[in-house]
Image: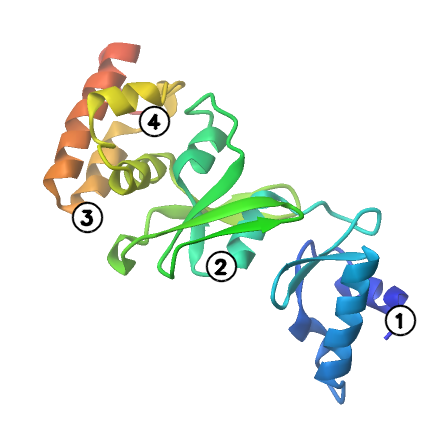
Amino acid sequence: MEFETVLKIIDTDPVFETSLFLSGNTNPKIVRLQLSRWVRSGRIFQLRRGLYTLAPPFQKIKPHPFLVANRLQKASYVSLQSALAYYGLIPEIVNSTVNVTTRRPERLETPLGNFEFRHIKPDLFFGYQMIDLGRQQALVAKPEKALLDLVYLHPGGESTSYLKELRLQNLEYFNLNTFKELSEVFDSPKMHTAVKNVTCLVQSEIGEYTPL
């Protein structure tokens, strides 16, 4: 298999799997051997076993970290600080792309950045949406669910002190009604406290709350 053939097959796909080249009478062992050679030569990056991306300057589209996160663990969506920063609700630049998953938690260091996966129960795997990232798409938590996930997974996340540490901003775009509705699925005292404290924080920041 020639590298030029690979480029034509991949075309504009930012991330690809080994299975893309295993159709017909192709020998899987030879395909994997050739991919390993191209990784060593720096033509492609291996993100994890069976998952790759073209290295610059061969990329037609630069892979977005959110798309990469979704592909690294398919049962996952971007959430917590990464989603909050994406929506402009916190000022910090997040160094790792943080996701929630129903699978095991893990941290991955790849040529495209660092990725963290936090485990959440299957019945709490909701509240996300498909986001258009410009010729790419990824599953990302809604703003309200991203904050709920963070509160749920962080010890003491419901406390006023922790919520103030987040330096939440642009709260006029945060829907308290949605936040309250989604929190009911968690059905825990911790999340009830979080709703009360977040409501007070939003109202103190923007005055009497009016849902958009």
Q: Is residue 53 left or right of residue 121?
A: right
Q: Amino acid at mark 3?
A: Val
From mark 1 to mark 4, how far is it between C-alphas? 51 Å
- Number of the front mark, 4 or 2: 2
Where residue 169 sits in the image (x, y, percent)? 39, 18
Q: Residue at x 21, y 21 (%)?
A: 160
Residue tagged 2: 73
Residue tagged 1: 2
- Number of the front mark, 3 or 2: 2
- Number of the front mark, 3 or 1: 1
Q: Amino acid at mark 2?
A: Gln
Residue 116 sits above or below residue 13 on the image: above
Residue 73 sits above or below residue 173 on the image: below
Where residue 16 sits in the image (x, y, percent)? 67, 62
Q: Amino acid at mark 4?
A: Phe
Q: Residue at x 49, y 59 (%)?
A: 73
From mark 2 to mark 1, how far is it between C-alphas? 29 Å
Secondary structure of the residue carrying numbered label 1: loop
Where residue 71 sits in the image (x, y, percent)? 55, 58
Q: Residues within 10 Å of mark 1 (few under 14, many from 20)?
A: few
From mark 4 to mark 2, how far is it between C-alphas? 28 Å
Q: Residue at x 27, y 36 (%)?
A: 151
- Number of the front mark, 1 or 4: 1
Residue 152 visible in the shown view: yes
Residue extending farthest to the left is 189
Count all numbered tags in the image, as a single digit: 4
Q: Are marks 3 and 2 in contact (CB under 8 Å)?
A: no
- Of callouts 3 and 4, which one flags the residue occurring earlier in the amino acid sequence? 4
Residue 209 visible in the shown view: no
